[in-house]
Image (cartoon, coloured by chain):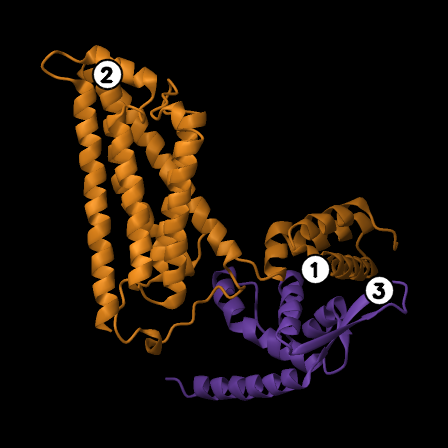
């Protein structure tokens, strides 16, 4: 009875697929021997061979769960280590992205000459889609963090001694994680815009002329911001040169974006044409949109400058 | 079996209470080298019935933590991985036994 039957081999390879490559051979060999031992034990107790093998494997249970418990992997999507950060960021992103998406979708339909019903009709799928997109990508990034960053200890040992003596707001790991997730989502959404587009009509908001050079430059600036954030997390606090690099990168990207908006190089030509067609002598839609975008970008820029100033001040105090 | 395990209502709590005792029993039984299925039988006979999908991951974890050492025995027809309790494992078992006794004594004194 020592020949391996199909059921055992199928189970062993299903488990082996889910354990780290380095452990695969050993886990398979040990599991194969254990199943054979148990099966023989049951046969000796009077069970029929096929039923014995089936019972042994049924008792071991779902191969993915079994493999996870063998290698100490988390059986949760997002564990206690990242749950709070995930929830905080998800709420923030939903609060920002969903209304913005709804307004853009409504605006596009209004410019295209829709009545109130059509505008609301365009906003509802935009709300649903952006909510699903934001939730999915944020969760995906944190689920990956949970797996890549995990050392196998799923319990976070915490004592009151671990509280920092003074709260250095400028140097928290959560800032780095937040920044990284934001960067991934920003880059993901512009790629989404270029390739698939938004809504049923697959509207591309950004001009294709931005690719590849302007977008590459912008990704570069985002990367610089992220690298600065990594340095800050490693050092534990901000200093003047790091803050200067971070502010410079933000200044260049925001001012660059404002200049490009006024040159008419940011918004897709189709959308520009629609906005022009919807304009009246008293209300130039293009100009209204440009002013709105400038106001938003300017607001973000002022926020960034204020944040850097505050972080630098806090770093000096301690 | 010492306890009446048929009462499904209490299963979750009983499992939780027994989880640590399987570690203790395994560490003591593996002073003599043993392999997965053999240990499963020994545990059952000694009054610590354990599921295979609980025991095997547990052995791996104890080995990683250095409380067990292992060696492959390829002399027989079926190659098996044999585990043996290390010195650190024996010290852990001592500590666990003291604790179990202290808990049993304390439980007796409960109102």
Q: CA distance from mark 2 to mark 3?
A: 76 Å
The image position of residue A97, as x and y in percent, is 29, 37
On the image, which quarter does residue A285 sit in? top left
The structure residue drawn at horizontal position 29% and vertical position 57%, both measured from the top left corner, is A243
- Label 3 belongs to which residue? B79
Mark 2 touches mark 3? (CB < 8 Å):
no
Please state, as top left, top right, bottom left or bottom right, where the N terminus of chain A lies in the image: bottom right
Most foreground residue, A187 or A59:
A187
Q: Nearer the viewer, mark 2 or mark 1?
A: 2
Q: Judge from the rendering whether residue A201 lies leftward or rightward of residue B13; answer left or right.
A: left
Foreground pick, A208 / B40: A208
What's the distance in space between the residues labelled 1 and 3, CA to CA?
17 Å
Tell me the subunit letter for badge 3.
B
Give the letter of the orange chain: A
Dot 1 falls on a residue whose secondary structure is: helix
Chain in purple, by letter, is: B
Q: Quadrant of residue A122?
A: top left
The quarter in which the C terminus of chain A is drawn is bottom left
State left or right for residue A287 relative to residue A263. Answer: left
**Residue behind mark 1:** A23
Residues beneath discs 1 and 3 located on the same chain:
no
N-term mark: 2 or 1: 1
Q: Which residue is mark 2?
A: A275
Q: Label 2 lies in what chain?
A: A
Front residue of A201 and A210: A210
Circle 2 residues within 10 Å: few <14, some 14–19, many ≥20:
many
């Amino acid at each position: 009875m020592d020949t391996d039957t199909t059921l055992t081999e199928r189970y062993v390879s299903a488990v082996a697929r889910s354990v780290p490559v380095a452990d695969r051979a050993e886990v398979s060999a040990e599991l194969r021997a254990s199943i054979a031992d148990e099966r023989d034990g049951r046969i000796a107790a009077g069970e029929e061979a096929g039923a014995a093998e089936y019972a042994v494997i049924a008792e071991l249970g779902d191969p993915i769960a079994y493999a996870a418990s063998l290698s100490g992997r988390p059986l949760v999507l997002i564990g206690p280590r990242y749950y709070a950060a995930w929830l905080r960021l998800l709420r923030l992103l939903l609060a920002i992205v969903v209304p913005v998406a709804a307004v853009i979708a409504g605006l596009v339909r209004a410019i295209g000459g829709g009545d109130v019903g059509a505008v609301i009709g365009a906003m509802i799928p935009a709300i649903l889609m952006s909510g699903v997109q934001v939730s999915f990508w944020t969760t995906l990034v944190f689920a990956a963090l949970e797996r890549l960053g995990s050392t196998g200890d799923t319990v976070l040992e915490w004592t009151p001694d671990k509280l920092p003596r003074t709260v250095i707001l400028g140097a928290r790991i959560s800032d780095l994680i937040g920044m990284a997730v934001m960067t991934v989502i920003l880059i993901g959404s512009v790629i989404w815009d270029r390739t698939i587009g938004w809504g049923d009509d697959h509207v591309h908001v950004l001009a294709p002329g931005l690719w590849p050079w302007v977008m590459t430059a912008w990704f570069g600036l985002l990367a610089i911001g992220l690298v600065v954030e990594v340095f800050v997390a490693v050092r534990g606090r901000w200093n003047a040169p790091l803050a200067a690099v971070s502010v410079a990168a933000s200044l260049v990207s925001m001012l660059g974006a404002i200049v490009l908006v006024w040159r008419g190089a940011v918004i897709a030509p189709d959308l520009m044409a629609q906005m022009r067609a919807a304009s009246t002598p008293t209300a130039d839609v293009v100009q209204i949109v440009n002013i709105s975008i400038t106001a938003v970008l300017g607001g973000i820029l002022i926020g960034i400058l204020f944040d850097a100033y505050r972080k630098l001040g806090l770093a000096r105090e301690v | 079996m010492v306890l009446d395990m048929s009462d499904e209502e209490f299963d979750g709590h009983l499992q939780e209470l027994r989880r640590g005792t399987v570690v203790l029993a395994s560490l003591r039984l593996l002073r003599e080298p043993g392999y997965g299925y053999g240990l499963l039988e020994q545990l059952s006979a000694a009054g610590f019935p354990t599921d295979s999908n609980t025991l095997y991951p547990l052995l791996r974890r104890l080995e990683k933590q250095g409380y067990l050492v292992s060696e492959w025995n390829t002399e027989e027809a079926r190659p098996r991985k044999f585990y043996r309790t290390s010195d650190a494992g024996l010290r852990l078992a001592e500590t666990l036994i003291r604790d179990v006794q202290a808990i049993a004594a304390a439980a007796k004194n409960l109102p």
